[in-house]
Amino acid sequence: MPLYEFECRSCHKVFEELVRSGNNGEGVSCPSCGGQEVGKKMSTFAGRMGQGKAPEHAGGCADGSCPMRGQCGLN
C-alpha cells in the first residue's frame, strides 16, 4: 500500500496515511481533529539525481509554493 500525505481542511494538520491503490483517500480522517474533509498533498521523496539536481515537480517555485519547501534548487 502506498503512503500518501494529506492535509485536513478543518485544522490544517498534515499527516501521512497508508491507502490502498485506487483509493483517493476515501475514508481517511484527520488523526488530530477527526475531520473527514482531507486533501491529498504533493509529496516529495528522497533520492539522488545526477549532478545533485532535484527532479522537476508540479507547481514550480516562482510563486513561492514550492512543494519541496525550497530544497529543489529551482527558486
Image (cartoon, rainbow, N blue to C red):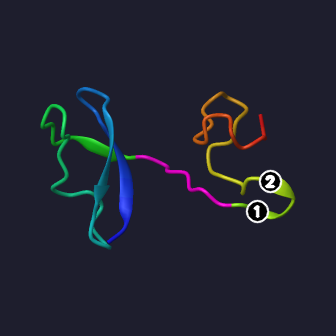
Quadrant of the image occupied by residue 48: bottom right
Cβ atoms under marks 1 and 2 closer than 8 Å: yes
**Image coords of residue 22 (percent x, y):** 31, 72
> What predominant SS class does the magenta segment belong to?
loop
**44 is within the stretch colored magenta:** yes
As drawn, is 25 to the left or to the right of 29? right
Pointer 2 residue: 53
**Could you tell me which residue is drawn at 80 percent across and 53 percent down?**
53
Give the magenta-colored segment's residue range: 41-47
Amino acid residing under circle 2:
Lys
On the picture, is 2 further left or further right than 29?
right
Q: Position of residue 63 (x, y in %)?
A: 67, 28
Which mark, by number, is residue 49? 1
Q: What SS does tag 1 mark?
A: loop
Q: Dividing the image into 4 quarters, which one contains the N terminus?
A: bottom left
Is 75 placed left or right of 3 in the picture?
right
| Residue 68 shown left or right of residue 50 in the figure | left
Tell me the kind of residue under disc 1: Met
